Every structure is written in C-alpha cells, then in structure tokens.
Amino acid sequence: MKIIPLSFMVVLTVVAVLVSLQVHFQCVYAQKVGDIISPMPRNVTVPNTDKILVSIVPGATFLTETAYNPNPIMVNVGQTVLWTNDDFSFHTVTSGGVGDADASRIFDSGLAGPTALSSTGKSYEYRFEMSGEYPYYCILHPGMVGKVIVI
Ligand SMILES: [Cu+2]
C-alpha cells in the first residue's frame, strides 16, 4: 500500500513538469510566430531595444509585402529602425506610397550617397519622433512595400 502513493506522486511530478515545459514552449513559439507573420496588436508592449532591425530579404525585387522583413513593424516614439540590404540588388527605403506627391519627404535612403542601399550589407536608419503610420516603398521596385507603425 505504501508503494502505490509514492509512484503516484512521482507520476504527478513528472506530469506537472511536462505541462509547465509545454506551456513555456508554446509561449515562446506563439511570440515568434506573432512577430513574423501577423501585425502586432495595439496592446503589445514593444521591446525597448535601441534599434528595430528590418531586413531587405534576398530576392526582394520580386516580392511585395514580404520584401521588407518583418513587415509591418510597430515601434515606440523615439525608436530607430535600421534597414539592412540582405539582397544583391540596389533598393531604397522611401517614405510614402508609389505616386504620392510627398513621397520621400519624411525619410529616404536615396539613390546616391552614404545612405544608399546600393549593395549587400549596406544599411539605413531613421528615428521616428511622432506617432502614426508610415508606409514606405522601394523607388526602384515599387512593388516592394512596407509599413512602420509608431505608437
Ligand atoms: Cu528595390
């Protein structure tokens, strides 16, 4: 009779450990998927890191909403977004939408100069000082579009 309660306690402990581990991994996995695939809901706390990193992915020329990754992104007022060209082609990070009269007025990595994302590894950064939604695109491949949401 004494062996049964002991083995029962061991089984209970093992189950408790397994359940807590599973819950932990589900949380980690869910956070990862949410960051990459879907826009973050408004009540999510934005990580207070120095710079938010966005990649211009390989083959971006032929992509649209996935050319900039992650996209869209949500940042706090005062945070800086750093875009890095991880592709072989020349790209831009240009505020506004294709054909907008005020496109490039807020930020633009440009077609020349030190901020131009002319080759692999080049990067461009912009610090967002006001809340709002900032669409952007690539002048050279207008199908490439992204959005920064500043809260
Ligand atoms: Cu481009």
Image (spheres, helix red, strand yellow):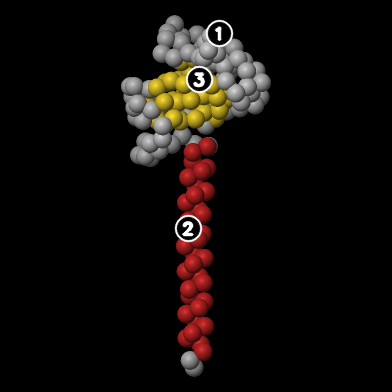
Residue tagged 1: 112
Task: Find residue 78 and report its horizontal and vertical position in percent.
Answer: 35, 26
Disc 3, SS: strand
Disc 2, SS: helix
Residue 96 visible in rendering: no
Disc 1, SS: loop
Residue tagged 3: 124
Taking depth in this image into account, of 51 and 60 the one nearest to the observer is: 51
Residue 56 visible in rendering: yes
Circle 2: residue type: Val
Viewer-nearest of labels 3 and 2?
3
State whether residue 98 is above or below residue 78: above
State whether residue 151 is above or below residue 43: above
Is ligand 1 closer than 8 angstroms to the Cβ of mark 2? no
Circle 1: residue type: Ala
Rendering quarter of residue 58: top right
* Residue at (41, 35) in percent of width and height: 49
Task: Find residue 10 and report its horizontal and vertical position in percent.
Answer: 50, 78
Task: Find residue 148 and report its horizontal and vertical position in percent.
Answer: 44, 25
Q: In the orientation shown, which residue stands out farthest toward the top? A: 101
Determine the CA span between mark 2 and mark 1: 50 Å
Determine the CA span between mark 1 and mark 3: 12 Å
Residue tagged 2: 23
